[in-house]
Image (cartoon, rainbow, N blue to C red):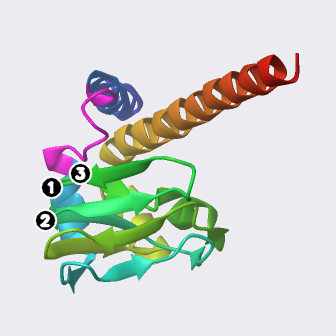
Amino acid sequence: MDSGEDGVKTAQKGLDSARNSVRDGYLVSEDERVLFAAQGRRLHLAAGEQLFAEGDTGRTMYVVESGQVELVFGEDMFCKQLGANGFFGELGLLIGDHLRSASARAVTDCQLLEIDHDGFGDMMGRDPACIAGFLHRAIMRVVDNEQSLMHSLRRRNRDLQSALD
């Protein structure tokens, strides 16, 4: 088998792994965690400390190593809590200068990994199959969130229409 076929099989393995874990709470895999830990900058947040606010410009993403982080998506939207191996802020990393869609604060004392664009580029060069799996899962989360938002908006529209009738 030539190296091109090896690369395709390795990338497919990463995508298969990502598909299997899409519904596992959007956690980084062990391989991803090791890769992110080698490249990321460690941050400590005390319980109650805010990392960023909704509307802030983001250029980095985060992986929770320990503790709990709460994401608040606005007053009339939902909140999400992430624990160990949860990731967030990936659109800031991937798009750059992206406005944060949620506020993030520590529920408990937290240890986070912060990954910037340069570090992510280095990781892509180091283990493209691992990063392909991560990107697949990150895109699936965006799609799931979009579908959930559309469902919520349709329900609100029906409720408003019923109230007006």
Q: Position of residue 161 (x, y in %)?
A: 83, 21
Q: Is residue 164 magenta?
A: no
Magenta stretch, residue numbers: 21-31
The residue type indicated by label 2 comes to Gly
Closer to the N terminus: mark 3 or mark 1? Answer: 3
Question: Which disc is residue 67 wearing?
Answer: 2
**What's the distance in space between the residues labelled 3 and 1, CA to CA?**
13 Å
- Which one is in front, 132 or 140? 140
* Secondary structure, magenta segment, majority class: loop
Disc 1: which residue: 84
Q: Amino acid at mark 3?
A: Glu
Q: Which mark is residue 32?
A: 3
Residue 123 placement: quadrant = bottom left
Residue 89 seen in the figure: yes
Comparing labels 2 and 3, the label whose residue is closer to the camera: 2
Left or right: 14 in relation to 140: left
**Mark 2 and mark 3: Cα distance apart in space:** 19 Å
Identify which residue is drawn at 72% across, 23% down.
159
Report helix, strand or loop for mark 1. loop
Q: At 40% across and 37% down in the image, what residue appears?
A: 137
Image coordinates of residue 107 in percent, x first then y, are 22, 68
102 or 23: nearer the viewer:
102
Q: Amino acid at mark 1?
A: Ala
Foreground mark, 3 or 1?
A: 1
